[in-house]
Image (tube, grey):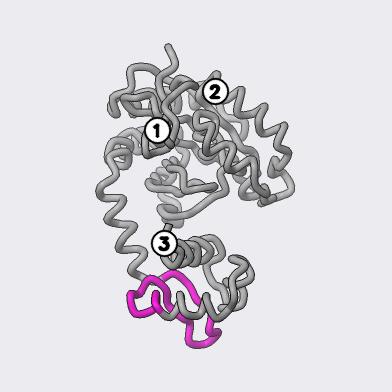
Amino acid sequence: MIQSIDRALRVLTVLAGDHRLSLGEIAQRLDLPPSTVHGIVRTLLPHRMVVQEHDSGHYRLGPAVLTLGNVYLDTLELRSRVAPWAEDLARRTGLAVRTAVMLVEDVVVVHHEPRPDGSRQMPEVGIVIPAHASALGKALLAFDDEAAETVLGGPLRSMSGDTVTDVRALRGQLKTIRQTGLAEEVEEAVLGECELAAVLCDRLGSPVGAIGLVAPAEEWPLDAAVVTALRTAARSVSRELGATSWPPHGDAPKASDMGTRRKRPRPA
C-alpha cells in the first residue's frame, strides 16, 4: 500500500461524510498530524478534488469528484438495468425508489426515482448512508459476510433515537433478511422516513446492490401489494443481471476471492 495515496483517499472519504471541515477537524478524524493533512489537501486543491471556502476556510469535496462519480455511474450496469424497473415501481406504488451499492461501511445511492406525485424533491444520487442504519445497507450486509463483519466490528453511529446499534440485534435482523431477501428500516436514518429494500444479485448470485422504497412514517407499514411489487422488481432486475434465482445464496464467493463484494444464488 502506498501511504500517501491511502491518506489522500481517507481525506476524501472524511469530507464525503462530513461535507465541510477545517484542517484541524480533518486531522483529528484521521488521527494524523495537521502538517501531514495540510500537505495532502494542498496537493488535492489544484486537481479540484478539494476546494476551500473563502469565508470559513473550511474544505469540502471539489467538482472533480463529481466528474469521476458521473463516469462511474455511466459505466455501472446495475444503474442502467434498474432504471426502467425503478420508474415502474415508483408509478405502481406512489413512492420514491432508491438503488444503492456498498461503499466500505456505508451505502451510496446510484439511482433515485422520485415520487410520481409532482412534488418538489431533492435529487438523491450520491448521498451516503451508514449501512447499519439503512434498509438498503442491511439488504446487502445480509449476503456479504465480509462487509457485515467490517460494519459490525466497528462503532455503530446512532443517526436517530431509533437507530439499531446493538450488534446482536443487527445480526438477528441479517439472519431474517437472508431468508426473505427483504430488509426494513423504521426512522433509523431519518426521522419520519421508513424504507423497505431488496437485495439485487448477478449471474454469480453475488449481491451487487439493493433497491428500496422510501415511505413517510405515517404510511408505514406498507401494503402487501407494495411489498410484492418491490420483490418482483428485485427479482426482475436480478434476472436481467444474469441471476438464476432470488434471493441469492448465503455461501457466495468472498470478496478476497472475487476482487469484489459478491456472493452466489440461493435456490428459489
Mark 1 highlights which residue?
A: 257
For the point 35% across and 63% down, the residue is 66
Density class for disc 1 (Cα within 10 Å; few <14, some 14-19, many ≥20) is few
For label 3, the residue is 2
Q: Say which label, 2 or 1, has the lower sequence index.
A: 2
Q: Amino acid at mark 2?
A: Arg
Q: Earlier in the sequence, mark 3 or mark 1?
A: 3
* For residue 17, above or below residue 82: below
* Count of numbered tags: 3
- Residue at image coords 39%, 44%: 113
Dot 2 or dot 3, earlier in sequence = 3
Q: Is 206 within the magenta?
A: no
Mark 3 burial class by Cα count in 10 Å: few <14, some 14-19, many 20+: few
The answer to whether one can see residue 123 in this image is: yes
Place of residue 116 in the rendered image (x, y in percent of width and height, measured from the top left): 40, 43
Q: Are marks 3 and 1 in contact (CB under 8 Å)?
A: no
Relative depth, front residue between 139 and 34? 34
Provide the residue designation for mark 2: 178
- Residue 152 vs residue 128, the one in the foreground: 152
* Position of 144 relative to 251 (above/below): below
What separation in Å lies between label 2 and label 3 (alpha carbons)?
37 Å
Circle 2/circle 1 CB separation < 8 Å:
no
